[in-house]
Image (cartoon, helix red, strand yellow):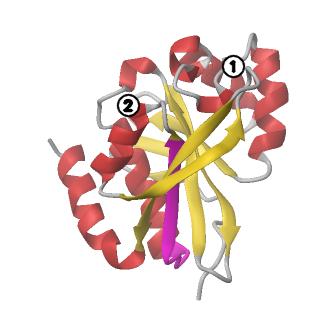
């Protein structure tokens, strides 16, 4: 039986994921509130101008999905965010996305550790059969990171999302299926343990 995520904290050896709260926004803004993070199209392609602007945009949006603050286990520092959303229980499908990290943690164990926790929750705790992950076609860094997870590229949704500047992005869609999860899990664990 497939069930929706319940918002529980997800804790691993590298990161801890807690439901994103209003009180996390100042730390989140310090981590990802800059143009470098948004340059590839994250969050519509434009960084919020202030903590208040981030709070006004993020808190209502986060309430529509299972948005998490990504914290380092070592010291509790917020280094980013990621979410599970677009829950479709009938079709056993969920979307893992809305992921942004502080540039200081790009290329570290943070992303594989975060994805391990979220995918484990989706497949093992909730019973989903498919997890979708997507990014903008111009965000080659994100596409490479998704492919490195072991996700399969399914295709491109053309003129799919309007960006902050009014232009449209093409969206590259990837997925991981439940029967692929054991191999993906092994790959993520190996990356984290390096």
In this rendering, would 105 be left or right of 53? left
Q: Name which residue lies at 29% across and 31% down.
A: 108
Q: Name which residue lies at 69% across and 61% down.
A: 86
In this view, the residue in front, 87 or 135, is 135
User: What kind of element bears circle 1?
Assistant: helix
Name which of mark 1 and mark 2 comes first in the sequence. Answer: 1
Q: Name which residue lies at 41% across and 76% down.
A: 178
**Residues at marks 1 and 2 touching, judged by CB atoms closer than 8 Å:** no
In the displayed structure, 6 sits above or below 113; it is: below
In the displayed structure, 106 sits above or below 59; it is: above
In this rendering, would 87 be left or right of 147? right
In the displayed structure, 155 sits above or below 100; it is: below
In this view, the residue in front, 66 or 37, is 37
Q: Which residues are magenta?
A: 125-135
Residue at the farthest front position: 158
Name the residue tied to disc 2: 141
In this view, the residue in front, 15 or 59, is 59
Residue 79 in view (yes/no): yes
In the displayed structure, 150 sits above or below 75; it is: below
Quadrant in which the C terminus appears: top left
Q: CA distance from mark 1 to mark 2?
A: 26 Å
- Pointer 1 local density, CA inside 10 Å: few below 14, some 14–19, many at least 20: some
- Pointer 2 local density, CA inside 10 Å: few below 14, some 14–19, many at least 20: few
Residue 20 in view (yes/no): no
Residue at the farthest left position: 194
**Relative image position of residue 103 (x, y in whole percent):** 42, 19
In this view, the residue in front, 100 or 192, is 100
Residue 26 circle label:
1
**Relative image position of residue 107 (x, y in whole percent):** 30, 29
């Amino acid at each position: 039986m497939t069930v929706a995520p319940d918002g529980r904290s997800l804790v691993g050896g590298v990161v801890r994921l807690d439901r994103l709260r209003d009180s996390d926004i100042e730390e989140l803004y310090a981590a990802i509130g800059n143009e470098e993070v948004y340059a590839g199209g994250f969050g519509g392609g434009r960084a919020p101008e202030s903590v208040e602007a981030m709070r006004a945009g993020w808190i209502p949006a986060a309430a529509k999905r299972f948005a998490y603050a990504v914290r380092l286990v070592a010291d509790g520092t917020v280094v980013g965010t990621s979410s599970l959303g677009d829950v479709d229980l009938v079709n056993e499908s969920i979307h893992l996305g809305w992921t942004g990290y502080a540039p200081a943690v790009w290329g570290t164990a943070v992303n594989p550790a975060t994805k391990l926790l979220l995918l484990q929750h989706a497949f093992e705790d909730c019973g989903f059969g498919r997890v979708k992950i997507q990014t903008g076609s111009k965000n080659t860094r994100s596409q490479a990171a998704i492919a490195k997870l072991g996700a399969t590229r399914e295709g491109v949704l053309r003129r799919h999302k309007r960006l902050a500047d009014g232009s449209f992005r093409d969206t590259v869609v990837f997925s991981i299926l439940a029967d692929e999860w054991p191999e993906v899990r092994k790959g993520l664990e190996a990356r984290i343990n390096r």
